[in-house]
Amino acid sequence: MKNIREIKDFYLAAYFLASGLEMLEHRREGGITVFHFEDGETLKGLKDQYYNNNGLVKPKHYGACLKSLKSIIHNAASESEVNNELQTKSAVD
């Protein structure tokens, strides 16, 4: 079984993606999206690099990862709104 780390920091999650970590899943929690990555030494090392400002990520690739996560967030928000609307309609009908 994998140890999962939940990441709420959008920019850190993009850094993990740009560094080659695979996002396992994501979910909406209230008004934010939580990203799940496998926890371990690689994640810890990348987190240290990120917060110590000494990482080695290609800027264009990081930008592409930011766009990808924004897409996920906006799609998840839209799906959530559609589901809420459908539940409201069902309750009224």
Image: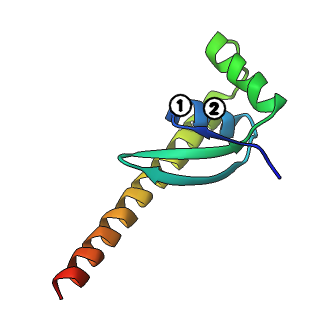
Labels 1 & 2 near each other (Cβ < 8 A): yes
Quadrant housing residue 18 = top right
Taking the spot 68% from the left edge, 29% from the top edge, the residue there is: 58
Q: Which residue is mark 1?
A: 11
Q: Position of residue 52 (x, y in %)?
A: 66, 10
Q: Which residue is mark 2?
A: 15
Q: Position of residue 42 (x, y in %)?
A: 81, 31
Quadrant housing residue 88 = bottom left
Horizontal side, residue 44 vs residue 78: left or right: right
User: Can residue 48 be seen from the camera position used here?
Assistant: yes
Outermost residue toward the bottom? Answer: 93
Amino acid tagged 2: Tyr
* Crowd tier of the residue under label 1, counting other residues whose Cα lies within 10 Å: few below 14, some 14–19, many 20 or above: some
Q: Quick one: SS at disc 2?
A: helix
Nearest the viewer among 56 and 32 is 32
Quadrant housing residue 93 = bottom left
Q: Position of residue 57 (x, y in %)?
A: 70, 27
